[in-house]
Image (cartoon, grey):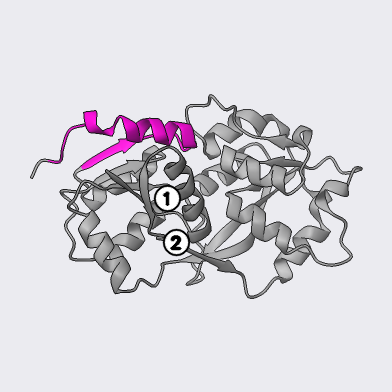
Amino acid sequence: MRVIVTRPEREAQRWVRDFSAHGLDAVALPLIQIGPVADTAALVQAWQHLSDYVGVMFVSGQAVDHFFASKPPGVSSFMAQTTSKTKVWAPGPGTAHALLRAGIAVERLDTPAPEAGQFDSEALWQVMGAQVRLGKRVLIVRGQDATNSVEQGTGRAWFANRVAQAGGQTDFVVAYQRGAPEWRAQELQCARQSACDSSIWLFSSSESIRHLCALLPQQSWRQARALATHPRIAQAAQKAGFGVVLESRPTLPDVVASLTLWDKSPSPTL
């Protein structure tokens, strides 16, 4: 059994190392390419007005890293603004850990409990929704498709709607760009082989599945197996035609446990 890790390059390599430490064979085959935004004016403005917000929601660890890397000279550090009551919100443990690495104090961070059934916008709202009231402003730090698509993602749109229902206002700032990878012949061959052998595709984003189908539009996935870290991602894998799709919480222990039990799952029906 081989695990195909489809996260962005840096994250994928870290997961491959973690899987190796658990005795699992894994290979990185990134399906999302990450890069900085060309125009940082909006990021600079966001840094200058952080205290205007009741809370800042980071959609991913990539959002955290690129936002903090964009801090302009002369602007006080987010952590140093002790007079500010602005909270920091993370939908899952990966984003929360990135914020802690960036220096955010634990008492300023709200995130779903480790035992939460899911890690997403809905779970986060259960933790911090009461903080949003009439007239309060919320900032969402997110990525943007490299084609400049304004698509916000299902979770982000849901979160913004809940803020509006509570009487608040949501602002967005784009911290990084994401797009489809440029695969060479070697990556294409690996993907084709992994579509019909015993490999397990690990998906943490529906966007990864869309990119995969665009890169190999004629490929059948009836013999392929996928492990998805959210029900919406599982639905995308099923729609793409994967023969067997299982779900797991996105934490490393949960994913490892799901992978080690994979042999007990049914095989794709041809």
In the rendered image, the residue lying farthest to the left is: 270
On residue 205, which mark appears? 1
In the rendered image, the residue lying farthest to the top is: 115
- The reply to whether the magenta stretch includes residue 91 is no
Residue 19 lies in quadrant? top left
Kind of residue at badge 2: Ile
Kind of residue at badge 1: Ser
Q: Which residues are magenta?
A: 244-268
**Compared to 195, does 86 lie above or below?**
above
Q: Position of residue 149 (x, y in %)?
A: 49, 67
CB within 8 Å, label 1 to label 2: yes
Residue at the image point whose x is 77% and y is 46% from the top: 103
Residue 56 at least partly seen? no
Residue at the image point whose x is 52% and y is 48% from the top: 157
- Give the residue pinned by disc 2: 32
Residue 165 lies in quadrant? top right
**Separation (CA) of disc 1 from disc 2:** 9 Å
